[in-house]
Amino acid sequence: MGFTDKLNKYYAENYIKKYGDRLAQVQGNVVSIKVEEKSFLGILYRLTVTLLVKPDRSKNITKCVFKKRRWFKKIDFMQISQGNYLLVQGLKGKKGKENREQIEIMNIRNLTTKKDLVPIEGKEPKVQKVKTKYR
């Protein structure tokens, strides 16, 4: 095991130790999506995305929020439409706080279009090449 592997393992263990009880994941269809983009003097860009996801075989609806700030560059967000089938990974709010019921989004995997917000290492879906014969 190299130095970078040990460092990655150390960070992963500490992250799970700190946030392990708050990690959450929701899989279901998108009921509503709201995207808010704001810029301040063209220098600071802020993106807030609010998703309402209805999990499989459930009556309740989960609110998921993605917030990001960036200097000097616009923030790109993936294409999501109402009715898409998503896997949302993130952190639940702290107990006793007002946002304890919503999930703070860390990654989204759109299972309808097979795209990710943050690319995941590992096996990528293979693209099949179709051979055709021209005469």
Image (cartoon, rainbow, N blue to C red):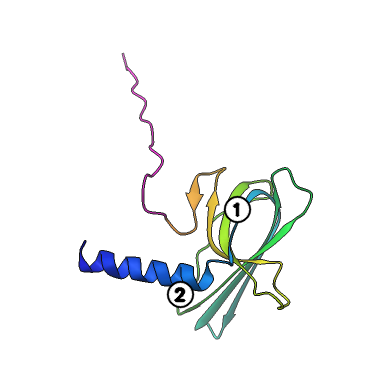
The part of the chain drawn in magenta is: 120-135
In depth, the one of 14 and 121 nearer the eye is 14
Residue pictured at 64% horizontal, 50% vertical: 81
Query: What residue does disc 1 label?
Result: 80
Residue pictured at 55% horizontal, 58% vertical: 89
Gap in angstroms between the C-alphas marked 1 and 2: 21 Å
Q: Is residue 102 left or right of residue 9?
A: right
Q: Residue furthest right?
A: 59
The image quarter in which residue 131 lies? top left
The image shows residue 1 at horizontal and vertical percentages of: 21, 61
- Which amino acid is tagged 1? Ile
> Which disc number belongs to residue 114?
none
The image quarter in which residue 5 lies? bottom left
Task: Estimate how packed mark 2 is, as few (under 14), some (14 to 19) or many (20 or more) residues with alpha carbons within 10 Å.
Answer: few
Which secondary structure lies at badge 2? loop
Q: Residue furthest top?
A: 135
Q: Is residue 53 left or right of residue 127?
A: right
